[in-house]
Amino acid sequence: MDTLLAILTIFAQPELLLLVGAGTFAGIYIGAIPGLSVTMAVSILISFTFSWDVYPAISLMVGIYMGGVYGGSRTAILLNIPGAPSAIATAMDGYPMAQRGEAGQAIGVTTVMSFFGGLVGILVLALAAPFVADFALTFQPRDYMLLAVLGILLVGSLSTGSLVKGIFAGAFGIAVGAVGRDPLTFAERFTFDLQLMEGGISFIAVMIGMFGVSEALLQLQNVNLKSVRQKIDRIVPSFGTIRKYLPLSLQTSSIGVIIGALPGTGGDIAALMAYDHAKRVTKNPKVPFGKGAMEGLVAPETANNAAVGGAFIPMMTLGIPGDAVTAIMIGALFIHGLNPGPMLMIDRPDMFWFIVGALLTANVFMLIFGLTGIKIFTKIVEMPRSVIIPLILLLSIVGAYAVNNRVSDVYWMLGFGVFGYFMRHYGYPLGPVILGVILSRLLDDNWRRAIISEREDLGRFFEGIVTSPLSLVLFVAVILIFVSQTPLWTALKIRLFRKATS
Amino acid sequence: MSRKLIGALVALGLGASVATAQDYPTKEIQGIIQWGAGGSTDTVMRSVTPHAEDALGGTIVMQNMTGAVGAIALNHVASAPADGYTLLMGAENPMLYKIMGLGDKDYSEFVPINILARGTPILVANNEAPFDDYAGMMAYIAENPGELRIGSTGPGGVPSVITAMMNTVEGDLDVIAVPYDGDGPALTALQGGAIDVMPAVLGAAIEGIRAGTMKPLVLFDTQASDKLPDVPAVTSFNEDYATYLPWGPFFGVFVPKGTPDDVVAKLSDAYAKGAEHPDFVNLMDNRGFTMMGISGDEAEAFLTKWQQGTAWLLHDAGLTKASPEEFGIARPGE
């Protein structure tokens, strides 16, 4: 009964309801603009809401978080520029749909599926938080490393065209991620003794440059092309469509919750892994992946919104942040006089249920705002290119500067934009570069931790993998996916098939 | 034309400097936080600054500038004009930049506005660890050389100083130091069993200890804390630690050297008042920090003593890139 009351607190106070709504609305736009990130918005809100009570402050932050994760998909679909790292995979099939004039439909499906993913995440948070948190804690450095290797194998599904070029792009991304002072030993890597390089290359700057600027440059070539008329009659997907993707979205939502709950991995990795999963389990997509497959939209969007609920799991049960945003929220709870930690659930269960309630409300608001503003939004793609291109460049510059308030990030962004433009021209996929940058530290740090823990003994390292069930499952998954993506497997299949027939 | 422009600029500059001294602050003040959002430094600064703003009657806009162990923020503020409109909100790390080869600047190029508080290090262990106190851990290390995994946060971090202290007092310990990027991730790993022992700040570990998700071994202080009265101070096991203790990381607000004295006085006054606010005192107490609230000569003396003690401890343990002597950091007591 108390639980129900705590969940419903938000409805008892119209002011809280309003704040969640306003937060979600603002979040959608913050998420949609490349460079304006949820992390940034929430950290500004800490100072802004300092004198408020804890409930209103948290309401606003939860709204922004939920809305922001969803908002990233908007620009990904309409302009081929992911508004946030977690929407990178969304662009791969969302933009081709917009090019065919199906932007309205793409946004509609994205919205409903984000809602569904968000719901799954919240349900797991509400019903199984302690179990998931305990499970997340059992991940050892070697497991994180295997997870990163698993992630790097996604290069295969992110590469449109040549796999070799994809591998090159991925390796380049890993190298970019390693630039700067190594966070574990503070040794300088690839810095060439330049102070500019010491802080590393901002991942967001790379992303905005590669997707935003290079897209704008590419569009310059068909500046006079008539823009595609968007069909906006079928925005809300039919029940049949939703039911068709239900099994897939349940799987990808689960991926999202688990990856979100792991401290150190978040919605961006979850969305990419879900995309890969969808590509592997969907045998005969109506439209091929990369050309506007509906499955390619459903998977990342369910996963990244499910990761929101997932990220709250270790935060609420253990006081350990699941990602950057929940890390800031822990700080906010401290400032408001609470003590986030394992005791929070026991001392202040109302806080836990209040957050569950706020997340649920934000999720509903997301659905409402997401489905209502589409007509105006799709007008963006119908604007003449001579208006859109300067706008994209402006947003990219503002976004890159806003990450750290550093002008050097703007230069990096522009540099990577031009580089990305030439990569596209020569058929190098950009997705693997970003994947490499995201996974670089996860792989590097955890490999070193794992091998240092085993006294730099490879024998002991593999012994650890074989004796731990979790590591073993991950290791086998890595091997299976690797083998299934290489020519070895095809050769093997042919041979086996021949044997069977002869 | 150009002469007029220069004249105007000079006049503007003069006008600005006069205004600075008299009615500071006339515009928004920038507060550069050395560490990321949600971390200890960030939390402390964001909770004290609004109270200081009230006392100052101005606005301080805070922003996180991370990277290179805080050196990027430090260099940014050091190169900003010394007019009191750019504050550095930092932790203890810059005091070790020079000897660690991380940079050529430290707080000696700054004037301390307020050293707000100090943390107390505590040694915590995974619940499954086969020992329950400091003596038990020492015995375990002696019997199982090279098996105990201690969490670390890179050279110059709290764990590296505590480990150096242990090596100096107890003789070289054969343990594995596993690096993490911050005590948060390391304490998470401790609970998952990836490391056995972690020297952390009391504030970061206290909630876990209260909930029983990790066990406290020993407090690195000269006396037990009233937050955890059952945890013994390390000096009760080995008197030799008293040479280096009390020691701990600290948080402070700084401005570049050359800032007008009356601006420094106004800021110091504002932060001193802010630090006395009951909400802030409560927050710091809850997180197990020791309030300091010192400024002026007292703060300078504290910084010098802290730097000497820590720098030589790390140097003697062979963890530094350059000798403290090169930078004129005297051996303590000399």
Image (cartoon, grey):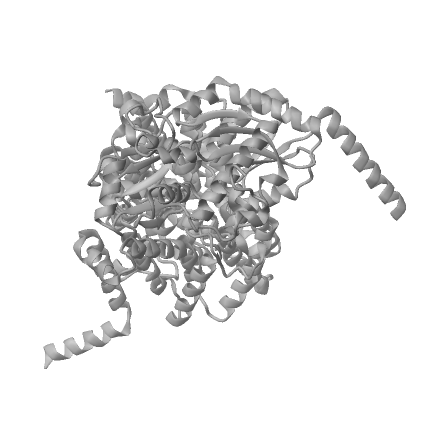
Kindly identify the residue that appears in the image at 19 percent across and 58 percent down. Answer: A463
Q: Which of B41 and B216 is in front in this view?
A: B216
The answer to which image quadrant residue B29 occupies is top right
B140, B333: nearer the viewer: B333
Whether residue A205 sits left or right of residue B159 in the image: it is right
Residue A115, image x and y in percent? 34, 40
Q: Quadrant of residue B110?
A: top right
- Residue, far front: B334
Q: Which residue lies furthest to the top in this view?
A: B278
**Marker count (numbered):** 0
Q: In this view, does B142 lie to the left or right of B319?
A: left
Residue appearing at x 42%, y 39% in the figure: A325
Q: Is residue A96 visible?
A: yes
Image coords of residue A80 (percent x, y): 48, 55
Q: Is residue B26 visible?
A: no
Image x and y of residue A367, in percent: 38, 38
Q: Residue at x 40, y 67 (%)?
A: A166
Residue pictured at 23% horizontal, 20% vertical: A1
Give A12 or A162, whichever is nearer the viewer: A162
Which image quadrant: the C terminus of chain A? bottom left
Describe residue A384's horizontal placement relative to residue B170 as left or right: right
Residue A365 image offset from top left, x and y in percent? 40, 34
Identify whether A355 is placed above or below A463: above
